[in-house]
Image: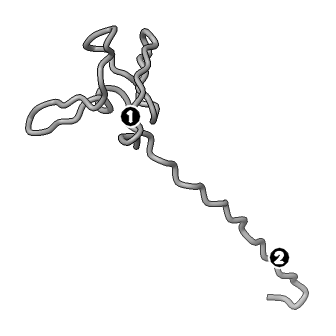
């Protein structure tokens, strides 16, 4: 190498910021409504009293609500989770 040759400047690589890990979404559909125990399907949520079987009520922490007719049943205070 010759003495007059200039060295190329060192270029630092930019580091990409780490992406936060995604949280796992809750299961949807039938898997959220039933649980299998001893080869039998057990309902996890109550059905609507007005609409009948097949209409599950949504769990809102302190109450259950039917999305079809709007019926609401409040949970007892000692059983709230």
Identify the image's colour scheme: rainbow, by chain, secondary structure or one colour.
Answer: one colour
Residue located at (33% from left, 8% from top): 51
N-terminal of the pair, mark 2 or mark 1, is 2
The reply, left or right, for residue 36 in relation to residue 27 is left
| Residue at the right extreme, as displayed | 4
The reply, left or right, for residue 75 in relation to residue 12 is left
Query: Label 2: which residue?
Result: 9
The answer to whether the residue labelled 2 contacts the one labelled 1, judged by CB atoms less than 8 Å apart, is no
Q: Nearer the viewer, mark 2 or mark 1?
A: 1
Query: Label 1: which residue?
Result: 76
| Residue at the left extreme, as displayed | 38
| Viewer-side residue, 74 vs 39 | 74
Q: Please state, as top left, top right, bottom left or bottom right, where the N terminus lies in the image.
A: bottom right
Q: Please state, as top left, top right, bottom left or bottom right, where the C terminus lies in the image.
A: top left
| Residue at the front extreme, as displayed | 77
> Badge 2: few (under 14), some or many (20 or more) residues near its Cα, within 10 Å?
few
| Viewer-side residue, 7 vs 72 | 72
Give x and y (percent) for residue 64: 41, 26
Residue located at (44% from left, 45% from top): 24
Residue located at (31% from left, 13% from top): 49
Secondary structure state at the residue bearing disc 2: loop
Quarter location, residue 52: top left
Secondary structure state at the residue bearing disc 1: loop
Give x and y (percent) for residue 8: 82, 76
């Amino acid at each position: 190498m010759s003495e007059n040759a200039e060295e190329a400047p060192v270029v630092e690589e930019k580091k990409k910021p780490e992406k936060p890990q995604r949280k796992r979404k809750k299961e949807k559909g039938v898997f959220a409504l039933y649980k299998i125990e001893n080869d039998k399907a057990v309902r996890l949520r109550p059905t609507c009293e007005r609409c009948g079987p097949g209409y599950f009520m949504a769990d809102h922490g302190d109450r259950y609500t039917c999305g079809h007719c709007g019926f609401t049943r409040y949970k007892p205070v000692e059983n709230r989770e």
